Amino acid sequence: MWIYITRRLLWLPVLLLMVSAVTFTLGTYGPGDPVRVMLGTKYNEATAERLRSSLGLDRPVMVQYADYVSGAIRGDFGESLRYRGRSVGSLLVSKMWVSFQVNLAAMFVSLSIGLPLGFWIAHKQGTWLDPAVVASTLVLMSIPIMVSIPIVLWGLCLKLSLVPCSGWGGFFDLRIIVPAITMGIPGVAGLARLMRASTLDVFGQDFIRTARAKGLSERYIDIRHVLRNAIIPVITILSFSLAGMLTTGFITERLLGIPGVGDFAIQAIFNRDYPVIMAFTLILSTAFVLANLLADIAYSLIDPRIRFS
């Protein structure tokens, strides 16, 4: 196991180097001039050249890239082109922490409802409850978030006055309820259907029939055999969700006034703030690699038959 983990971690710098090279190339040769965006209506060639020189954008591309990689290794992602005097790290860390808290609350809603619901409806296969529950979750999943947010705000904020209508106050603030519900409910359908299909597949396995033939109780079989094996495919989906917890929806943040990283990343793209874009890409790439590694480790912990060499 440790050899496998070490091999995966050794590949991480290689992967990040390739991601950074592609992102840097696109930022350098892609459409749009960050200097022109920064100057706006005050743009003129003389001022632009002085600004490029001060930012180091007039140096050879390979020199710029080498300097960036050298700084990124030390945790220095440079200075934002949009917010002069502010480091990219200081800008991203606070906003990613907000996004992480919002996604954590939404994931809690999805998991706490979706997994038990999928496991339960798998036991109701052949009854009217099975298609009725699946159809209901699909209806909730199909509602766009720009529609569900006003509905939830109308009920919880305007009519019942249970939560504030907008803003951000942290994970334990009542204002997290609205984004948790609106972002978490659509995930219930996918998790419930996946858990249902996985549970039904385990029901048909020989070791389940053997356990029943031994006279073991259904409750014991469900907990000891069915659930542990049915949860394995779900872990793959959760690993990608775990990596995506550093981002939130652009629409959610705009409508609810959440100072997360989604709206900030969109602004960085429009403003050609390439240091922010590159840092954001590298951090997400690292998160996806580590999340997949955690998923592989979780496989072996849940199912002793899975071994990595």
Image (cartoon, helix red, strand yellow):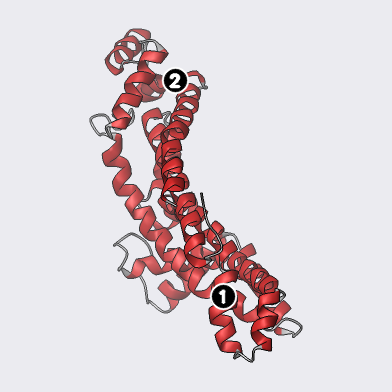
Please report the residue visible at 35 percent of the width from the left and 66 percent of the height from the top.
175
Distance from the alpha carbon under mark 1 to that under mark 2: 54 Å
Q: Categorize mark 1 by other alpha carbons within 10 Å: few (<14), some (14-19), many (20+).
A: some
Residue marked by disc 1: 227
Q: Are marks 1 and 2 in contact (CB under 8 Å)?
A: no
Say whether residue 231 is left or right of residue 177.
Answer: right
In-front residue for pair 22/81 = 22
Query: What kind of residue is marked 1?
Result: Leu
Disc number for residue 126: none
Q: Categorize mark 2 by other alpha carbons within 10 Å: few (<14), some (14-19), many (20+).
A: some
**Quarter location, residue 119:** bottom right
Residue 113 in view here: yes
Say whether residue 97 is left or right of residue 231.
Answer: left
Please report the residue visible at 44 percent of the width from the left and 77 percent of the height from the top.
159
Please report the residue visible at 32 percent of the width from the left and 59 percent of the height from the top.
168
Helix, strand or loop at label 2? It is loop
Residue 222 at x, y percent in the picture = 58, 82
Residue 144 at x, y percent in the picture = 59, 59
Residue 276 at x, y percent in the picture = 37, 34
Residue marked by disc 2: 33
Please report the residue visible at 32 percent of the width from the left and 31 percent of the height from the top.
72
- The tag earlier along the polypeptide, 1 or 2, is 2
